[in-house]
Image (cartoon, rainbow, N blue to C red):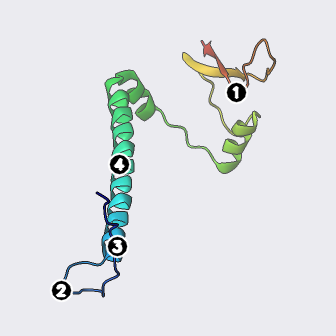
Amino acid sequence: MKQQPVILRPQAEGSPEGPSSREVLRSAQDDKKRSRVRADLRGIYIIWYRDVLRFWRDRARVASALGQPIDLSRQQYEALHDGNEPAGLDYRPRREFTIARVGTTYQSAFQDLGVEYYEYAL
């Protein structure tokens, strides 16, 4: 027995027969967008919460982050960023890790491009 094809006829907006096919399609698309946004926000929240927990569980990290901040001027920040000695900054690291250098090698046998090498300042 051969099945008859289903033909959808457009209906007028707000007809007594129910929502039109356009309204149903629009509603389904809106639901998809909302669920995507909800999923994205949930993922962002999960990552943020994980990082906050990790930060608060490491007591030394919290203490050092809140302990001794250094106010930098724009010129001092730019000098540090460029690897130069900033003028007017009398800070010398003591008993902490500092970045000794950043890797620049990019060869087939070895690559350390962008890798930070640390040293301990006494």
Q: Which mark is residue 7?
A: 3
Mark 1 touches mark 3? (CB < 8 Å):
no
The mark lying in front, picked from 4 and 3, is 3
Q: CA distance from mark 1 to mark 2?
A: 66 Å
Q: Earlier in the sequence, mark 4 or mark 3?
A: 3
Amino acid at pointer 1: Gly
Which residue corresponds to mark 2?
A: 16
Residue 15 place in picture, x, y as percent: 23, 87
Name the element at disc 2.
Answer: loop
**Image height check: is 105 above or below 28?**
above
Precedes in sequence: disc 4 or disc 2: 2
Name the quadrant of the N terminus. Answer: bottom left
Q: Amino acid at mark 4?
A: Ala
Of mark 1 and mark 3, the one earlier in the sequence is: 3
- Above or below, 108 against 70 in this view is above
Between residue 69 and residue 21, name the one nearer to us: 21
Badge 1 crowding class, 10 Å Cα cut-off, few under 14, some 14 to 19, many 20 or more, is few
- The amino acid marked with disc number 2 is Pro
Q: Residues within 10 Å of mark 3 (few under 14, many from 20)?
A: few
Front label number (1 vs 3)? 3
Left/right placement of residue 91 relative to residue 62 reads right
Relative to residue 119, is residue 55 depicted above or below? below
Q: Quadrant of residue 64?
A: top left
Element class at badge 1: loop
Q: Gap in Å between the C-alphas at discs 1 and 4? A: 33 Å
Residue, disc 4? 39
Lower sequence index among marks 1 and 4 = 4
- Is 64 or 102 nearer to us in this picture? 102
